[in-house]
Amino acid sequence: MFCEKAIEIIRELHRMGDGQLPAFNEDGIRQVLEEMKALYEQNQSDVNEAKSEGKSELIPTIKFRHCCLLRNQRCVTAYLYDRLLRIRALRWEYGSVLPTNIRFHMCAEELEWFNQYKKSLATFMRSLGGEEGLDITQDMKPPKSLYIEVRCLKDHGEFEIDDGTIILLKKNSQHFLPRWKCEQLIRQGVLEHIMS
């Protein structure tokens, strides 16, 4: 049946919740593109036949195939665009370094797009707020307090805060640190916010 594989890749994507990125369905995309190529070639031959021999009974079939082509095109475009929106949201959630399990689900072109987006965002942030720039990915939610208590989930090494104090982040150690300095490490899974 026409357009089934295109609808299947869309359904597969929507089965995953927001913030999750399923593995890129290269096989599904390839099958949809092959179907589109076959539909296009069938239409070309029918159009040539309709023109040369005047077979007007082929026109409804040609229109139907063309509608299938357009539907497949919309489905593939929607699939790719939704994945890009999810990848963009992951940049804001995890920062400039994505976990390997998420990178594993991305194709080479998506990794390239992510790196370009990351560079564009970094350039924009450097252009804001004077010499140091402004990290707009921090404080995604308004903070209740400027300092938070955190527990280190894995050995990270030395960590310097604004006043020059160097803190050694060792597994299971607890610290009272400025929120804005910790948010990136919390997203990366190095620190855990301790709710009291």
Image: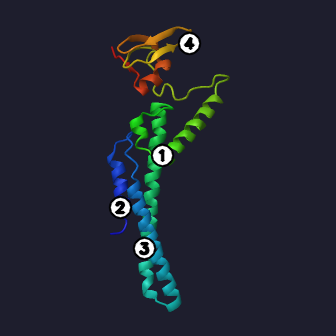
Q: Nearer the viewer, residue 33 or 84?
A: 33
Q: Position of residue 194 (x, y in %)?
A: 35, 16
Rendered position, 138 above or below 106: above
Name the residue tied to disc 3.
Answer: 65
Residue in view at x 59 percent, y 36 percent: 119
Q: Position of residue 171 (x, y in %)?
A: 37, 15
- How crowded pointer 1 is (Cα within 10 Å; few <14, some 14-19, many 20+) is rated as some
Q: CA distance from mark 3 to mark 1?
A: 29 Å
Look at the picture and state if 27 lies above or below 87. Answer: below
Q: Amino acid at mark 3?
A: Arg
Residue 31 placed where, x, y %? Answer: 39, 62
In three-dimensional space, the C-alpha distance between marks 1 and 4, rounded to whole angstroms, equals 35 Å
According to the image, label 1 marks what residue? 84
Going from the N terminus, do you reach mark 3 or mark 4 first?
Answer: 3
Q: Which sits earlier in the primary sequence, circle 3 or circle 1?
A: 3
Q: Secondary structure at mark 1?
A: helix
| Labelled disc at residue 162 | 4
Up/down of 174 relative to 88, above or below: above
The reply to whether callout 3 and callout 4 are in contact (CB within 8 Å) is no
